[in-house]
Image (tube, rainbow, N blue to C red):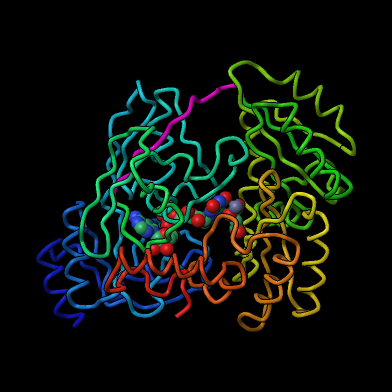
Amino acid sequence: MVDDALSEIRRIVGEQHVISGDDTAAHVVDWTGRYVGTTPAVVRPGSTAEVADVIRVCGEHAVAVIPQGGNTGMVGGSVPLNGEIVLSMQRLNTIGNVDRLALQVSVDAGVTIEQLQTAVASHGLRYGVDFGGRGSATVGGTIATNAGGLNVLRHGMTRAQVIGVEVVLGTGEIIDLMSGLVKNNTGYSIPDMMCGSEGTLGVITKARLRLIADQSFRQTALLAFDNVDAAVAATAQLRVALPGLEAAELMLADGVGLVCEEFELSAPLGGTHPVFLLVETASESDDLERLIQHVVELDGVADTAIAADERQRQLLWRLRDDHTTAINRVGVPCKFDVTLPHDQIAAFIPKAKNLISALAPTSTTWIFGHVGDGNLHVNVTGLDGEDVLDKSVYELVIAMGGSISAEHGIGTAKSAYLPMQRSAAELNLMRGLKAVCDPTGILNPSVIFDQ
Ligand code: FAD
Ligand code: MLT
Ligand code: ZN
């Protein structure tokens, strides 16, 4: 079955674009090293038409497919855990001309976020979603996961940037919604539906994206606090006082200490504070005075460092961006990406830590995140077995009014727990959509829905 499909696929994409054996290594393990699979082949189509033909052949032969972008996803959705074919989108990497009237750009799904940012920067523009994985994460993958990142509190998640998509359904049909019309209320919004669909409804081949002015005056400050409550309250105050606030990132002393140790950076602000908030504004004129004035007015700030130049700004951001890499160096982490109501964030942290250390006494818990969005990343290293924590952590999150997936998606990691959060009616609706878009069930069959 697979062999017959692959013979046809070789004719479609060319022999050299069907990879097998050792050459598939980078495509079968996820970024964290937690999810490891095998695949008969990695297929690298070079056009939308080729994607459509490959999908049609896979449907005819009932061969399952994992669409893959940069393979930076955090929930085990981008790797072939059940021997699926990997459909790598990396050859679809063209960036169209920037539409300066509409402030939009059309890009292929395999373009990375960094490539996109670089291409639009020369027009004084920027893409509203950005995060530490920018060098590898692709436009298609970020749409599929509805990625959030560092600037959600000002610009929204990926869904807010996507005006249109071109997508190949599980039937092999191509849907082209790339007109760029911002206002287009003609029935259900298919681009919205594709955001967060995690490759289960269709393969995104192109996207029409909103761009924003790149406000060149950036001010970046690291604030130290004695407790998380004060950092949460300060975030709320700054969001009101500073309309240009782009980022508010929470870090704790252990995580910052780990990053400094792993990357030989100096401990910030004397290294004695338990809680840090990294804030950044972007505006069209110099906001420094305003930032200082409002920081001074905040309650509970124990100390402050303001970046004086781009080098210092990069150093402050490394403290945050390098958390994920530093934690991975400690060991393969178990990751919880959760949202809490803002008034529960401070209470959640000790509750989660206590719960995890009771269930897994030899583990270490690292917590940081996008506090402006109520989004905490709980990473646990040093676990002996699999899944000893998941159900209990998700029960805690739900009991506190939160969500078990903030920005990474469900993937295969959380599929068993989705019914804890979504009703039977909601799941039926989702399965119904899946059945229409992918009637033979070949697209990411183990993602989102528990088998
Ligand atoms: P992949 O990992 O290849 O795939 C992810 C999912 O999308 C899979 O289910 C896959 O099947 C599907 N998919 C991929 N491409 C397509 C396509 N063209 N059509 C249909 N389905 C497709 N995420 C955040 O939200 N915020 C962060 O701040 C953040 N920080 C990160 C920092 C680091 C250092 C890293 C490594 C990751 C981070 N992430 C973050 C995770 C993030 O979800 C992914 O990086 C990104 O959204 C996935 O893009 P990708 O191209 O790597 O997709
Ligand atoms: C981040 O914000 O750095 C990633 O989304 C988080 C993670 O590693 O869990
Ligand atoms: Zn994140």
Residue 136 visible in rendering: no
Is residue 356 among the parts visible in the rendering?
yes
Quarter of the figure that contains the N terminus: bottom left
Against 115, residue 203 (above or below) is below
Number of callouts = 0
Position of 222 with respect to 202 (left or right) is right
Residue 245 vertical position relative to residue 359 in the rendered view, above or below: above
> Which residues fall within the magenta stretch?
205-217
Q: Position of residue 320 (x, y in %)?
A: 66, 47
Q: Is residue 208 magenta?
A: yes
Residue at image position (61%, 64%) is: 329
Residue most toward the left? Answer: 11
Instruction: Give the residue drawn at x 34%, y 63%.
Output: 67
The main secondary structure of the magenta stretch is strand
Q: Residue at x 43, y 52 (%)?
A: 195
**How far across and down, in percent of the image, does residue 66 sit?**
34, 68
**The stretch drawn in magenta includes residue 300:** no
